[in-house]
Structures are given as C-alpha cells and as structure tokens.
Amino acid sequence: MAYSEKVIDHYENPRNVGSFGKDESGVATGMVGAPACGDVMKLQIKVGPDGRIADAKFKTYGCGSAIASSSLVTEWVKGKTLAEAETIRNTQIAEELALPPVKIHCSILAEDAIKAAVADYRKKHGTPESTENTEKPGLRAAD
C-alpha cells in the first residue's frame, strides 16, 4: 500500500506529540480506540481564556495513518472554538491525507477523539453546546 507524502510527513515528523501536565488549566482529553485494529488515540486540547483552543497534543498507538491523522488534527484544531473544532469531519481528514479506503477508520478515530475531547471540556467546565457561536464573521444569509 502506498502512502501519500502528507501521511509520510506527519508520520516521520509528527506534530504536537505528548501530554499536558495534570495541573494545567483548560485541558480536556478524548481517548478513543478501534478494537478491530488495535489503534488507540489520545487527543488533548487546551482551551484559552478566549474560549479558543490554544494548544493540542496527542499520543497514538497505531499505524502510520492513525499517527498522521492525530498529528494533522492537532494542527487543525488550534485557534478554533469548541464548536468549530466539532465541525471537522473524518472525510476532510481522509481527503487531506489521501488515505486509502482500508485506512479510513483512522480518520474516523481522529474525528471521534476531537468530539470526545470537546465533550470532556464541556463536562468539566459546564459549557453547554448551545452557547457556542458557529457563525463565521462577515458571512450572512442572503436577504
């Protein structure tokens, strides 16, 4: 199976590997796994005072596609609100990395990890989903 250059780059040079300290504020964790293939993904987000994701880290046990998917989403979520991060879909991850069909489950894990981390943050900080503003500045519905 041939991997895309982006998968190889994120696998050989993974971004944001590691974990936040236990005492750091604004940190939430999403832990997901796929028993069928043995991949386990831990994604942590750190939300700043402005409500945006200031940083993200991951630890993944799995294949190159799982590591690449984790690495990519840590880059993508930075600077986003929780609601914006939740709009990231596995199809976008799979397309960006040009994942073959047999590796699509890795992009699904990454999407699930984002959702789990956001849910963990909301649970810890009592942030309901309905308070998030998902509109993009400057975009309005047609009159």
Image: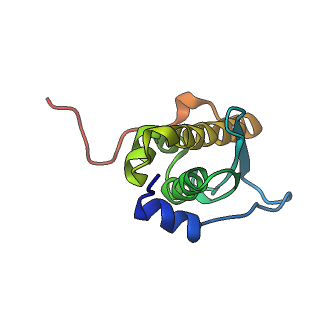
State left or right for residue 92 relative to residue 9: left
| Percent position of residue 132, x then y | 51, 36
Asked if 36 appears above or below 19 in the picture, the reply is above
| Percent position of residue 86, x then y | 51, 38
Outermost residue toward the left in this view: 143
| Percent position of residue 17, x then y | 68, 64
- Give the camera-side residue of 141 and 31: 31
Residue that appears at 73% across and 63% down:
18
Residue 133 shows up from this direction: no
Outermost residue toward the front in this view: 1
Residue that appears at 82% across and 62% down:
21
| Percent position of residue 71, x then y | 57, 59
Which of the image's four quarters has the C terminus?
top left
Snapshot quadrant of residue 109? top right
- Give the camera-side residue of 116 and 124: 116
Asked if 76 appears above or below 102 in the picture, the reply is below
Query: How was the colour assigned to the protein in this rendering?
Result: rainbow
Residue that appears at 43% across and 62% down:
6
- Give the camera-side residue of 128 and 78: 78
Residue 19 shows up from this direction: yes
- Give the camera-side residue of 44 and 127: 44
Please give the count of numbered marks on the rendered protein. 0
Outermost residue toward the bottom in this view: 13
State left or right for residue 25 relative to residue 76: right
